[in-house]
Image (cartoon, rainbow, N blue to C red):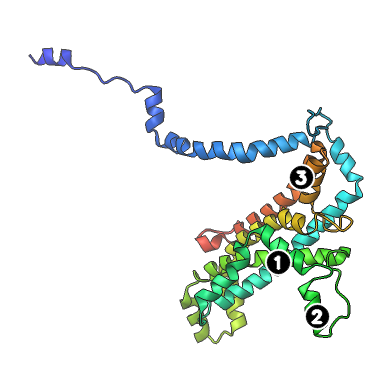
């Protein structure tokens, strides 16, 4: 009987390759990441690749282009308007980012203290960030109006000036005006993010420093700043990227004028590609932005690598 039972016992079938793929832990991770990877490829990698390809063609709106290699970049090299847009973009990004960080850090430290109506003050700080960009741009456009500017009117009433300031008609006035508008919009993002970071610093560190006789500057230099460094690196990377690629604010206020004085690389690319119809040339200007953006990302990455000790790892 025992021999008969052994003879009729069924041997489990070998699982198919598909079954193993569905149950393997390593493959399960890949399956779960597949939708995100497809989304990133469709909406990020494909447009980026298409833009790089268009930058090497003479494509125009309504006409397929042919491959011309680096001809568009060679032409841009001799284009003074392109180099002016590079200068404007670097100036716009550098000045706005420095001021956004300084004002944002000051507001974050201020709001981290016990203040009356602290929740209300935090909501007020967020206001510029929640107003639609075009709406705030229209408000600034009105404030910079050569005839009806409330800034000029106030200064005239105070006796500080005798004639209206030509905010958007003079090249340098226009540059500083759009930089101020960008700072006004960007400060809340930096302030609220740094405030969230400040609230993660253990109070015991400040108590120990107080017992040791440290003053406020020493506590900021040796406790607050080191603990905030990873957050500062991330926040400033995003701030620089958003500022470098800014388009809406500039286009709504000045459209790149006067005489291209406020043209950024993003607005010049749009003007050449969409309004002018030269897709290849506009794509080349956009592609030229990539090295600057990569440099900003790499600076942040190397900064974070040097702060691994805060996560319990050794610095590289």
* Residue carrying label 1: 183
* Percent coordinates x, y for residue 137 in the rendering: 71, 61
At label 3, counting other C-alpha atoms closer than 10 Å, the crowd grade (few under 14, some 14-19, many 20 or more) is many
Q: Nearer the viewer, residue 47 or 147?
A: 147
Please name the residue shown 88% across and 80% down the image.
Answer: 162
Q: Residue 286: give its label.
A: 3
Please name the residue shown 81% across and 46% down the image.
Answer: 271
Q: Which part of the image, by quadrant, shows the C terminus?
A: bottom right
At label 1, counting other C-alpha atoms closer than 10 Å, the crowd grade (few under 14, some 14-19, many 20 or more) is many
Mark yes or no: residue 213 visible. Answer: yes
- CA separation in Å, label 3 and label 1: 23 Å
Please name the residue shown 73% across and 46% down the image.
Answer: 290
Q: Nearer the viewer, residue 252 or 215?
A: 252
Local SS, label 2: helix
Contact (Cβ within 8 Å) of mark 3 with mark 1: no
**Above/below status of 258 relative to 209:** above
* Percent coordinates x, y for residue 116 in the rendering: 51, 82
Q: Which part of the image, by quadrant, shows the N terminus?
A: top left
Give the number of callouts: 3
* Percent coordinates x, y for residue 11 in the rendering: 24, 18
At label 2, counting other C-alpha atoms closer than 10 Å, the crowd grade (few under 14, some 14-19, many 20 or more) is some
Q: Residue 155: give its label.
A: 2
- CA separation in Å, label 1 and label 2: 22 Å
Q: Nearer the viewer, residue 1 or 257?
A: 257
* Percent coordinates x, y for residue 69 in the rendering: 83, 32
Say which of marks 3 and 2 sits in front: 2
Please name the residue shown 50% across and 71% down the image.
Answer: 199
Mark yes or no: residue 306 visible. Answer: no
Say which of marks 1 and 2 sits in front: 2
């Amino acid at each position: 009987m025992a021999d008969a039972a052994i003879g009729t016992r069924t041997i489990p079938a070998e699982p198919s390759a598909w079954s193993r793929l569905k149950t393997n832990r390593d493959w399960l991770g890949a399956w779960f990441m597949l939708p995100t990877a497809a989304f990133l490829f469709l909406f990020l990698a494909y447009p980026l690749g298409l833009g790089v390809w268009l930058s090497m063609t003479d494509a125009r709106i309504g006409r397929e282009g042919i491959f011309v290699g680096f001809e568009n970049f060679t032409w841009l090299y001799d284009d003074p308007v392109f180099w002016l847009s590079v200068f404007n973009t670097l100036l716009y990004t550098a000045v706005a980012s420095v001021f956004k960080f300084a004002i944002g850090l000051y507001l974050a430290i201020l709001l981290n203290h016990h203040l009356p109506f602290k929740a209300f003050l935090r909501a007020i700080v967020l206001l510029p960030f929640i107003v639609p960009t075009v709406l705030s741009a229209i408000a600034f456009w009105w404030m910079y109006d050569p005839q009806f500017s409330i800034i000029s009117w106030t200064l005239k009433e105070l006796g500080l000036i005798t004639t209206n300031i030509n905010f958007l008609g003079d090249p340098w006035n226009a540059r500083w005006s759009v930089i101020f508008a960008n700072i006004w919009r960007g400060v809340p993002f930096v302030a609220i993010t740094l405030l969230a970071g400040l609230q993660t610093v253990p109070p015991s560190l400040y108590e120990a420093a107080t017992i040791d006789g440290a003053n406020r500057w020493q506590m900021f230099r040796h406790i607050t700043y080191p603990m905030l460094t990873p957050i500062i690196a991330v926040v400033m990377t995003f701030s620089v990227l958003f500022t470098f690629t800014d388009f809406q604010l500039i286009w709504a206020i000045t459209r790149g004028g006067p005489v291209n004085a406020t043209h950024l690389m993003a607005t010049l690319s749009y003007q050449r590609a969409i309004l002018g119809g030269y897709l290849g040339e506009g794509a080349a200007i956009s592609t030229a932005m990539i090295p600057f953006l990569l440099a900003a990302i790499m600076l942040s990455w190397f900064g974070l690598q040097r702060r691994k000790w805060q996560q319990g790892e050794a610095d590289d």
